[in-house]
Amino acid sequence: MELTGDGAYQLIKQAYGICKEEGLEYSGVYFCFRQSVYDTQDDEHGRDPAMTLLAYIRRGTGTYRGWVGVARKLHDLLLGEGVYGVSVEIADPRFEDNLSLYACYPTDIICPVWRDLVPEIIAQVDTTGVNTIGCFRIGLNDTGRSDCAPTVLLGVDYRVQRDWKSVRETVVHVLDRYNLSSVAVLIRKDSGKPSLSAAGFRNLERTSLGPAACRPDPSLGSSLSAHGVDTQDAMGMFTLGGWVELRNPETGEWVPLALTCSHCCFPREEGLSAADREVLRTWKQEGVRTGDPNAARLLSMDAPCYRDITAGVDAKESTMARSKADKVYQRVEAARAQGEFVLPGDKAKWKTASRILEALEKDRDSMKSFVQNGQHVLGNVFAASGIREARSTDDANKLSVRDWALVQPKSGRSAGDNAVNPTLAETKKVHKIGRVSGLTHGWYSALQSCVLENETKDGHTVARKTWEHVVAKPSGVFLKLGDSGSLLFNDSGDVLGILFGASERGDIAYFTATRDLLQDIRSITGVLEIRMKQE
C-alpha cells in the first residue's frame, strides 16, 4: 500500500480504531518525517528524517505504561498492509511543550543540604557525559512556580549514548537517603558545557544594525568581536557587557574600559604561527597581563561587529533593490528618461519612493564609511582573565569560572552609555542586554549549579567540578549564542556579575559574581580601585 491519498487515509483510520479499542485519549494520528533536533544535516553523524506514523495520545496517569503494546499493534498494522521501513512513535502532546523552569525558593527542603548532596551524587554516578547538576522548580508551561516540584536537573551531552535510566535511579536513591522523596529528577540532553561551545555557533543569528549603532561610543549591549573576523564566521560574535573604570595609581585618573568575556576576544589557533599559538595557550591558562606587547598584535577588538554592520548594509541594499523593482517606480523612471508624460498618481508614488531611497542610500553610505575608515575598531585588550578556574570569594574550598576581558578604547573611540532602565523589569529579579536576544528577564537561583569537566585517569572518569551562579527563565530564552559578555543587573540597575554561558535552550544561564569578577581583575591588573563607569 502506498502512503499517499486514500491509502494513507485508510491506514490512519485503522490506527484510530486501534487507539479507540485500547481506550486511549488520542488527539491525532499522522504520517510525517521525524528527526531529532540533534540529527542535523550539517552534523557528520546526523541521520536523515525517518518516515513515521505519529500518534498523539494523552497519558491518563503517571503510572500508565501501556504504550509499548499499542505501538506494536500499530507497527503490525503497517506490516500487514505491506508498508515497510516506517517507524511508529507515540507521544503525549504535552511532551512537545517546553517545561517551565523556575529558581528554587531559599526555603525549599533541598537547599540546606544541596552542597553536600551534589558530591554524593557525583560519587555514586558515573559522570561520563554529565555536564551540569542543578536544582530548579520544574513543571508544565501552565504551572506556576509554587506548584512546580523542586527537581534535580542533570544536563547531559546528547552525543553520549548510555543508559540514562539507571543514572536517574541512582540519583533517586541518593535523594531517598537524604529524605528528599518529594524532589524529582530530570535528565535533559544538552549540546555540551555551558560555555556556549563552538558546535552551537552554526545557528548564531546575523544581527542587522542601523547607522545609529555606528558611533564612536558603543553602549552596554553593543555587539563586539575580534577584529578581522570574516562576515560568514560566527565564531567570534559577542556582547560588550558594559563599561568599568580603573583608577590609575600614578595619575589618580579613572580610565574607562569595555568589559566582556575573555573567550570572546581570543582568536582561533588556525592560521597562527607556532609561537603565537603558544602565546594564546598561555593567555587562556594564565590570563593577559597589562602591557603585554602581543595584545596589540593579536587582541584587537571591533564594536560593533564588522559582520553586523555588513548585515545592516546588506539589509539597506536589499530594501533599495525592492523599491527600485516596483513597477510604478520603473515605469516613471523609464518615462522620465524618454521625456514622456507621467500620470500624477504615479509621480506622487515615485517621489515618495525616491525620498525613501535617498534616505536608505545615505544610511548605507555612512555605514560603509564607518567601516572603511576603521572607525569600528574599538581598541586592544588591556587585560583578561583567560579561561580558568579560581577559588570563590564566598567559599575558598569551591572553584568557579573566571572569564572576563577589559578592552581599552583607541584614540577616537570612547566609553558609551552604561544606563539600564530598571522600570523595564520591575516585576523581574534580574535582567541583561545582549547582542542577539536584547533585553531579557529571569530569576536568580538560590542554588548554584555544579559544572563538571570530565577527565579520564587510569581508565576511570574523574569529574573536576566548579560551582556557578545561575539564572533561570521560566519560559523562552534568557541567553543566546552571541550574548556572552553581557552584564547581569537587578531591578535597581546594580551589576550582579558577567554572563559567560548557558544551556543549549538558553533557559539556564551561568555568570561570575561581581565580587569574584572584581577580585580577579585586581589580581590580574594590580589595580585596587575599580568601579562601574559613572554617568
Image (tube, grey):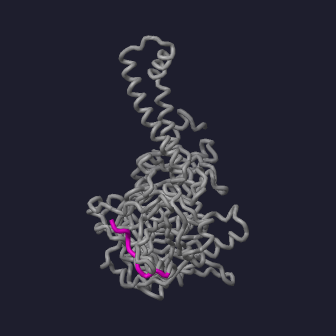
- Region in magenta: 526-535
Q: Percent from the top left, x then y, of residue 370?
A: 50, 48
The C terminus lies in quadrant: bottom left
- The quadrant holding residue 508 is bottom left
Image: 159 above or below 460: above
Q: Residue at x 50, y 61 (%)?
A: 411
- The quadrant holding residue 296 is bottom right
Given residues 271 and 106, the one toward you in this image is 271
Given residues 43 and 201, the one toward you in this image is 201
Given residues 83 and 424, the one toward you in this image is 424
Image: 497 above or below 236: below
Q: Percent from the top left, x then y, of residue 224?
A: 50, 59
Image: 323 above or below 482: above
Question: Magenta stretch: residue 336 in it?
Answer: no
The prevailing secondary structure element of the residues shown in magenta is loop
Report the residue that reaches farthest toward the right. 274
